[in-house]
Amino acid sequence: MKTRFWLLALLSFIYIPAVHAHDVGQDMARAASKFLGALSAEEKAKASFPFKDEERLNWHFVPKERKGFPFKEMNSDQQRLAHALIRSAMSPHGYAKATNIMNLELVLQELEGAGRRFTRDPALYFISIFGQPEPKGTWGWRLEGHHLAVNMTVIEGRLVTGTPTFFGANPAEVRQGPRKGLRVLAL
């Protein structure tokens, strides 16, 4: 009986009812369209790719050169709209984890000091839109940076998949400073 309960709990966590998938897909299309509408032609060129572009499959969660439009280059209104896009696809708990992962860059910056190998910056996370976000369209988007990769695919206006997705944390537990005790990936 316990095994069946846990299996049902797991299935209820990953199952997206068809009506909900449709709503989420449409919410994401609206959020992505608003985000793209706030970009200049040059910024839109950085953020936008054809749906079948190979870049859609070029995701990773380690520090590396990335394509897309980075938070670092966004103005405050564009950042607000980018965050609205992220929230459109995540629960409040998932959104908090994602943004806390991004903010761990400040902790790593302090821990690693001036001689660090990689730039640590919570604004070095990139938004990419693949295809044209339309309410009944086929398109996708990605949020990517160090220890965070979220890929969403919408087909005919319905959220079909939120994979591949990676949430990681470094450090796993903040041991000093104002965020002491923070464990981003704790349940």
Image (spheres, grey):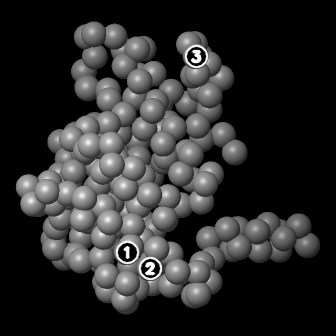
**Residue at the disc numbered 1:** 29
Question: Horizontal placement of 105 versus 184: left or right?
Answer: left
Mark 3, secondary structure of its residue: loop
* Label 2: element kind: helix
Q: Residue 178 carries which label?
A: 3
In the image, 129 versus 169, the foreground residue is 129
Which circle's residue, 3 or 2, is located before the other in the chain?
Answer: 2
Q: Residue 119 carries which label?
A: none
**Is residue 120 shown left or right of residue 98?**
left
Q: Relative to 124, is 66 above or below?
A: below
- When asked about the image quadrant of residue 2, the answer is bottom right
Left or right, residue 139 beside residue 175: left
Q: Nearer the N terminus, badge 3 or badge 1?
A: 1
Identify the residue at horizontal 37%, vertical 56% (top origin).
81
Q: Which of marks 3 and 1 is in front?
A: 1
Residue 127 locus on image (x, y percent) = 29, 54
Q: What residue type is labelled 1?
A: Ala
Image height check: is 173 above or below 164?
A: above
The answer to whether any part of residue 34 appears in the image is: yes
Q: How far apart are marks 3 and 1 (CA)?
A: 37 Å
Q: Is 89 above or below relative to 95?
A: below
Residue at 42% in and 14% down = 111
Question: Measured from the top left, where is residue 21 in percent x and y?
Answer: 53, 81
